Image (cartoon, grey):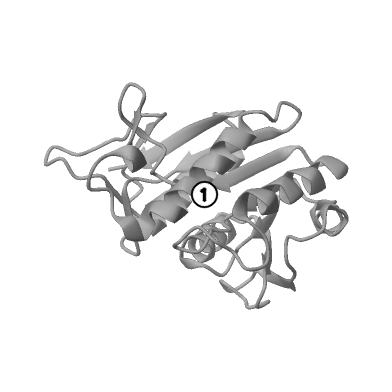
């Protein structure tokens, strides 16, 4: 496949790029820096600030991935995170591409019916803004009925680690292991992300991934 990946140089995005390239896909890696996230990627320096520019970048690809993340406090001096994702969706709409897979957050996952992780007492203040920004994007995507989108939430803890290929796929519920921990390596998250691009198994919905 020919994949366009926004936010390709970040912790998660660079691993998605590497995973896709390892499977033989072509990756156009879009970032503000224009850096090469993995050998074989085609770097492009661009920002998500104009739907016409997004459409121009997207045209000719088979799928679009977005690994763009909000700042930790949820703010962005250039554009609110929700507005940025609205521009992204508008741009994809203007192209002939319909497949969009988005790196989401864990804060909107439910710990009990109707109770989100981010709303629980003790949720770290340092991560709350980021969690709420991601949750707003999920709510927005759920209103989008003319694109083939998927929003992928990681476990509560995601960090660089090993690529094992051994993880669980879930939905809206926070998944934990036998010790009550919710975690996933960025490498295994990337495996699940590229799997979803290839298989299109969770169209117009949210999926989650954890050990």
From the viewer's perspective, tell me whether residue 109 is left or right of residue 65.
left
Task: Provide residue 39's location: percent of width, then percent of height.
Answer: 58, 74
**Dot 1 surroundings within 10 Å: few (below 14), some, or many (20 or more)?**
many
Q: As rendered, which of 89 and 183 lies closer to the eye?
A: 89
Q: What residue did someone put label 1 on? A: 133
Name the residue furthest top.
113
Task: Provide residue 65's location: percent of width, then percent of height.
Answer: 63, 50
Q: Is residue 196 visible?
A: no
Task: Provide residue 8's location: percent of width, then percent of height.
Answer: 59, 64
Task: Provide residue 76's location: percent of width, then percent of height.
Answer: 59, 64
> Is 75 drawn above or below residue 132 in the view shown?
below
Residue at image position (76%, 37%) is 98
From the viewer's perspective, tell me whether residue 15 is left or right of residue 122.
right
State the count of labels: 1
Residue at image position (46%, 46%) is 132
Where residue 182 sits, quadrant-wise, is top left
Q: As rendered, which of 90 and 164 lies closer to the eye?
A: 90
From the viewer's perspective, tell me whether residue 206 is left or right of residue 58.
left
Name the residue furthest left.
179
Where residue 48 sits, quadrant-wise, is bottom right
Dividing the image into 4 quarters, which one contains the C terminus? top left
> Is 197 drawn above or below residue 56 in the view shown?
above
Q: Is residue 5 visible?
A: yes
Residue at image position (44%, 54%) is 129
């Amino acid at each position: 496949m020919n994949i366009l990946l926004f936010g390709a140089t970040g912790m998660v995005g660079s691993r998605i790029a590497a995973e896709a390239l390892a499977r033989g896909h072509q990756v156009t890696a879009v970032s503000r820096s224009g850096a090469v996230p993995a050998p074989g990627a085609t770097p492009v320096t661009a920002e998500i600030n104009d739907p016409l520019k997004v459409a121009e970048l997207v045209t000719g690809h088979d799928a679009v991935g977005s690994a763009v993340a909000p700042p930790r406090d949820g703010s962005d001096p250039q554009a609110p995170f929700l507005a940025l994702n609205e521009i992204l969706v508008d741009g994809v709409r203007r192209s002939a591409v319909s497949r969009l897979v988005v790196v989401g957050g864990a804060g909107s996952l439910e710990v009990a019916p109707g109770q989100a992780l981010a709303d629980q007492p003790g949720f770290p203040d340092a991560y709350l803004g980021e969690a709420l920004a991601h949750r707003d994007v999920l709510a927005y995507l759920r209103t989008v009925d003319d694109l083939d989108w998927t929003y992928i939430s990681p476990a509560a803890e995601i960090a660089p680690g090993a690529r094992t290929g051994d993880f669980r796929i879930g939905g809206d519920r926070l998944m934990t292991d036998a010790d009550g921990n919710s975690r996933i390596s960025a490498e295994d998250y990337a495996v699940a992300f590229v799997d979803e691009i290839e298989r299109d198994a969770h169209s117009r919905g949210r999926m989650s991934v954890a050990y």
